[in-house]
Image (cartoon, rainbow, N blue to C red):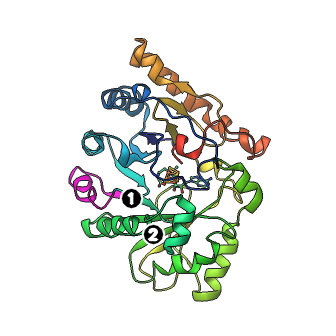
Amino acid sequence: MNQVDYLRISLIDRCNFRCQYCMPEGSELSYVLQQDWLTHDELLTLLREVFIPVGFTRFRLTGGEPLLRPGIVKLVEAIAHLPETRDLALTTNAYLLAHLAQDLYDSGLRRINISLDSLNPQTFEQIVGGRMRWQKVWEGIQAAHRVGFSPLKLNVVVIPGVNDHEVLDLAALTLDRAWHVRFIEFMPIGNASLFANEGWIPSEDLRQRIRDRWGLTDSTVLGNGPADVFQIPKAQGTLGFISQMSECFCDRCNRMRLSADGWLRPCLLNETGQIDLRTALRSGISTQTLQNQVSKLLELKPEINFKARESGTSGGYTRTMSQIGG
Ligand code: SAM
Ligand code: SF4
């Protein structure tokens, strides 16, 4: 079992996009009230006095759309400069990135993942639910590249009949750029009806398409995340495959998730064991007690991880990906 040292921190559950796969169609989402967000100070207190002491040293800021969080640059700076922070990364849709990339880099951020589900502006805008989006996202990606974020990863959720015909075009981005394109199997969290209608494509099918076109070498697996990493021969970048539907990587899970309103969630696929850290903190419970609770949850995590597998992964989820943070 991996050491659990990686915390995904959702800074906000709101988003300026409405990606088909992430949010349910039609029905309005109810958002966490701003007064219920963990404040910057509360978050930093939890990191310093609860998470770091029990072994968390790698952090990812996500959302909703984390660049919508007021004061994001200051928060990045504070987390990047905690002496125990070994790694800090951000996942964004890049719509607001062009003008924030330099400030984020200067405040200590080095790693960034950007969602890019299509190279075709019309398809992209159909997926993310809005007009005139693609160009700004592409400018955000170029800005991140110029500023020097490395590695620069592009996340693609592959939906049959929607964007799977672009897999080769997206893979081709790695031929002469040191970018890392990662194909993610569509999961039934967020938009259950789209999932029921369109289904998902196993990563191995995508790899076969890429192999048929260029060949595909196994590359050294980078990092210890959930992606299996391959490379087109002589390409500058790599291709990652996150196959949570076709493969079980629960035994290598190294992470927990903290929501914008302070719920700590040990497993993406089920809601067992969640702790409401914000309410506890605001009611005056000591951070030592919270640290003990999180330690206990770490002990229970291996068992919790497999719960969803045992009961099937298509159960009802009360939170969407935009609320959990991916
Ligand atoms: N807004 C940011 C973004 O889109 O990159 C960060 C939050 S988003 C919820 C984090 C990740 O979750 C994205 O890479 C997104 O593609 C992924 N995601 C959302 N819904 C998904 C689903 N149903 N299946 C698989 N991945 C999903
Ligand atoms: Fe927003 Fe990211 Fe979800 Fe798309 S995937 S709706 S950008 S949170």
Question: Under 8 Å from ligand 2: the CB of mark 1?
Answer: yes
Q: CA distance from mark 1 to mark 2?
A: 19 Å
Q: Position of residue 245 (x, y in %)?
A: 70, 56
**Relative to 172, is 90 on the left or the right?**
left
User: What residue is drawn where x is 31% and y is 64%?
Assistant: 144
Point out which mark residue 180 bears: 2
Screen quadrant of the N terminus: top right
- Mark nearer the N terminus (1 vs 2): 1
Q: Is residue 156 visible?
A: no
Q: Position of residue 199 (x, y in %)?
A: 74, 61
Seen in the picture, residue 172 relative to 80 is either above or below; the reply is below
Q: Position of residue 232 (x, y in %)?
A: 52, 82
In terms of secondary structure, where does tag 2 sit?
strand
Please state which amino acid type lies under the numbered disc 2: His
Point out which mark residue 95 bears: 1
Q: Is residue 58 visible?
A: yes
Seen in the picture, residue 47 relative to 9 is either above or below; the reply is above
Estimate how packed mark 2 is, as few (under 14), some (14 to 19) or many (20 or more) residues with alpha carbons within 10 Å: many
Residue 109 falls inside the magenta stretch = yes
Which of the two residues, 274 or 96, is positioned nearer the viewer here? 96
Whether label 1 touches label 2, CB < 8 Å: no
User: What residue is drawn where x is 62% and y is 30%?
Assistant: 300
Quadrant location of residue 236? bottom left
- Which residues fall within the magenta stretch? 97-111
Which of the two residues, 204 or 101, is positioned nearer the viewer here? 101
Q: Position of residue 308 (x, y in %)?
A: 72, 41
Estimate how packed mark 1 is, as few (under 14), some (14 to 19) or many (20 or more) residues with alpha carbons within 10 Å: many
Residue 186 falls inside the magenta stretch = no
User: What residue is drawn where x is 65% and y is 31%?
Assistant: 272
- Between tags 1 and 2, which lies in front? 1
